[in-house]
Amino acid sequence: MTVTQQWHRYARMALMMLTDAALVNVAVYFAFYLRFDTPHVPVIYLVPYLHALPLFTVGTVTIFGGMRIYHRLWQYASARDGLLLVVAISLSAMWFTVDILADGGAHYPRAVFALYWLLALLLVGGTRFVRRSMTDLVWHGPRLNQSHVLILGAGKMGQMVAAEMVRHPEVGHAVGFLDDDPQKQGMQMGPLRVLGRLDDLERVAASPALWAPTEGPIDQIIVAMPSVEGRVLRKVVEEAGRLSLRVRVVAGVNQMIGGQVRVTQMRDVEIEDLLQREPAHIDLAEIAGYITGRTVLVTGAGGSIGSELARQVARFDPSRLLLLGLDETSIFDIHRDVVRLFPHVAAVPLVADLRDKSHLERLFQAHRPDVIFHAAAHKHVPLMEAQPDEALCNNLGSLWHVAELAERYRVDRLVFISTDKAVNPTSVYGATKRAGELLVSALADQSRHTKFVSVRFGNVLGTRGSVVPIFEQQIRAGGPVTVTHPEMVRYFMTAAEAAQLVIQAGAMGQGGEIFVLDMGEPIRILDLAMNLIRLSGLTPGEDIEVQFVGMRPGEKLYEELLTGEDRARVSRHERIYVARQEAGRSSEVLPQLDELLGLAEAGQNDAVVAALARLVPEYRPNRSDRVRTLPAAARGSLDLRGETHGLES
């Protein structure tokens, strides 16, 4: 704050103090006037008051200052501010009574003191709330070229958004609400009316007569529903895109400082919003029971999933958090992030190759982890199709090294991060993850010290190499956006939700389970691409072309979460299922895994694929150089009507 700004602030506070000093004495005068019904205060009452006036005035202003009445922005006053002002004026009334009694005013009518309290509250409080009242209650018509905004959600959040838009007309001019609550239909919320349900968006947007016949149609939507689910928001975004309307959202009330909406909290919709679900219930006590005060190791900590796991684990105050990975830059980044967000957690960065078992054992000897989250893996499907030996050595060999050391050093539990691509796999990557699940189940049969469990889930939004960052890069480059198949679907969840559920599953595991996360509704990749284009303010088929290029090696149209062998049952958590594998298979599985790793270390790729198929009977290798499952008429680019135009092969 500059010196000039400080002087302006002090001058404003001094003016408020002088104004209050005058107002409280005016309140005393009118208290006398109302009590005696005459403008002339009887001398017997006037003299004690004049004697007490300086001390009373200074004392009242001091009370107001001590309660920081002069440090508040009253144009944003809340009910709590009003209550504080009532308390301050009540203390002033008590001070007035004490001063008068001290100056021989024992004969004063008690009505004077009560009238002073009411009049001071009216005058002092009224001057402060008049600006707020005018801001909230006076409706301002739209300015020239001002956008017309429809607010979705007529609850507390929606009303705060409407009030903020009046204070900041540059945001737009609110014309009304949409809300699914039947009791709010047609009701007036301040100057605005609830114009219909969310399904009425197109009708309301195309009917200016509903709110003001002289105004133009709406051109912007603000979603003011703090817990809106992704499926609802996807529908709104798709409808708004078709109507060429901009969509913005507001942060939840629990994310706002002081419970107030601010212009900066109104932002464009992001792809994470479209996948948002109701927050998962997490048993904090159960998680803390196996993480708090323990040494936790996260392998692959520099990756997208591993780094989010590290952040979520740090919330539960482990005694040490070991961040292990091969890429030194990513380990440096996540270590710096954890130290910044959780300075009280002892985070230890470790750079190591998990295939180097001797080095890994030295780390176990030095740090003695209690809990391990194994997220390290090669994950790029097409790359692993070309290098099955590398996929096996890294994804399976590293897991086996970590698991053997976990048992040897009496780690309490190891949580292996698997994938939905392990179910009926068509890719080498998926088959290696299924082999990892079999390994973990086999080791759980033999373990005496460590609880081995697997957690299986689908795509995590925004991970490196996933489809969303690729689409975003293609959109920034001006297109085209390439989609493999118009009917390809995938499960998605946010990294934070996935990490929280993985940690919860780890707390529930007793050994040998495969926990399957509820991924919600599968989403068409084409719909995801179209929504990303719309969220960028562009029109699919006009501004950005969408091209179908055919499926790549190892890909399939849809993913599954359970194999034919899984005996799934509901766990005590509503979003975690348990697929318990058949026990006692370690004697047949472990030798096959050992043979498989030997072939991989020898670089015999064809033999690796054949051995994988024997180990995982449901594995159907799909390793052709160029997989094209689209008929010729379906390969091509999408126009405005969703039709396709042929592409050259």
Image (spheres, helix red, strand yellow):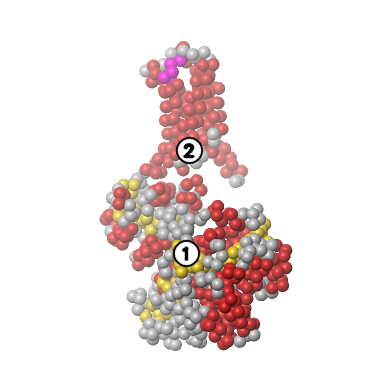
User: What residue do we see at 63% from left, 64% from top?
Assistant: 449
Please tell me which residue lies in front, 505 or 473: 505
**Relative to 57, is 550 above or below?**
below
Please tell me which residue lies in front, 324 or 19: 324
User: What residue do we see at 55% from left, 74% from top?
Assistant: 585
Image spot of residue 134 (x, y percent)? 39, 41
Image spot of residue 139 (x, y percent)? 35, 46
User: What residue do we see at 55% from left, 26% from top?
Assistant: 58
Q: Mark 2 — residue?
A: 81
Residue 391 appearing in the image: no
Residue 111 included in the magenta stretch of the image: yes
**Relative to 499, is 542 above or below?**
below
Task: Tell me if 570 is positioned left or right of 310 in this view.
Answer: left
- Residue range of the region highlighted in magenta in the rendering: 108-112
**Relative to 437, is 15 above or below?**
above
**Relative to 594, is 229 above or below?**
above
Which of pointers 2 and 1 indicates the residue nearer the eye? Answer: 1
Under mark 2, the amino acid is Asp
Regarding mark 2 in the picture, which secondary structure is present there?
helix
Regarding mark 1 in the picture, which secondary structure is present there?
strand
Nearer the N terminus, badge 2 or badge 1? 2
- Quarter of image, res 62: top right
Which quadrant is the C terminus positioned in? Answer: bottom left
Q: Mark 1 — residue?
A: 577
Under mark 1, the amino acid is Tyr
Please tell me which residue lies in front, 283 or 534: 283
Image spot of residue 516 (x, y percent)? 49, 66
